Amino acid sequence: MPDHVDPASLAQEATGNAADGGNADNADNAVPLPTDNPFSSMEKAVTSQEVTAGARRSKRLPVIVLWLVAIIVIVVDQASKQWALSALSDGRHTALFGRALGLVLVRNPGAAFSFATGQTWIFALIASCVVAIIIRVSRNLASGSWAVALGLVLGGAVGNLIDRLLREPGFLRGHVIDFIDYGGYFVGNVADIAIVAAAAGIIILSLGGWEIDGTRAGAPDDPEAKGVGAPPSSIRRGSRNRGKDRAEAPSKPEESLDASTQATSVEPQ
């Protein structure tokens, strides 16, 4: 050991050791910087808003189709009835395709195709209930096919309901205007055709398993929601843990210090 120790060298050495210790402590206590930033948060928010807006538009479209179909049926039905009242005479038959199809003006006090004559007020109430049910169901409507079918039902029900409410002999007792003669078996109108077409469509959709919300019974769910086609959760968890271990592996200043000391120190002979 030397006889004289320079105080300046001792202070410099102490300062260096303190700096090394501080660096080691900082390395051990280092906090990783957050990977998120305001721009990524804004991008996620904009993306989520776009997805939500797209879902709302896709949900509104079937409802718009339903009302368009219903309005078209109502307009055509009422226009054709007004034409029948002005162009046809009561009880006079006009042949179109021989006996199979013709035109004859009939004021029907019953249901569709002249059934249940004399019970007009009952069918007026039933038609009102059908309209209310369809409007309520349309909140969950997400299928174009169901939109067309329900639009036909709504248009046909409202078309005949207008007659029962506004035509003679009075409110809830009005006679429905029928003018399409089906071979002498029954007489109907455009609203009746729409209702029958809707009934056939609803039967087909129900047998095929198509739901009002756009799904189909027995069809596999969304792969992303159920994890179909994605690697097992254990594999994903393992890969995340390995990445986390690599990113957050703690440094060992003691081992690195011992290795550097052994490599650089030389014992005196």
Image (cartoon, rainbow, N blue to C red):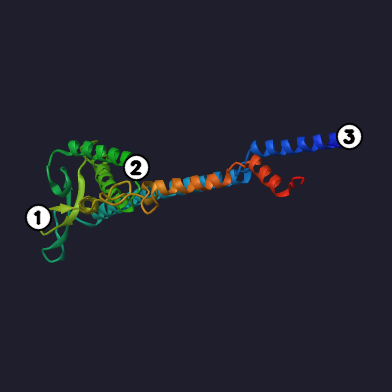
Across and down, in percent, residue 125 comes to 22, 36
* Three-letter residue code for mark 1: Tyr
Q: Which of marks 1 and 3 is in front?
A: 3
Across and down, in percent, residue 151 comes to 30, 49
Local SS, label 2: helix
Which one is in front, 263 or 74?
Answer: 263
* Residue indicated by mark 2: 140
Q: In this view, does 95 lie to the left or right of 4?
A: left
Q: Which of marks 2 and 3 is in front?
A: 3
Mark yes or no: residue 125 visible.
yes
The quadrant of the image that shows the N terminus is top right
Q: Is residue 38 left or right of residue 160?
A: right
* Residue indicated by mark 3: 3
Q: Which mark is residue 185?
A: 1
Which circle's residue, 1 or 2, is located before the other in the chain? 2
Q: Residue pushed farthest bottom?
A: 97
Q: Which mark is residue 254?
A: none
Which quadrant holds residue 14?
Answer: top right
* Alpha carbon separation for disc pair 1 and 3: 132 Å
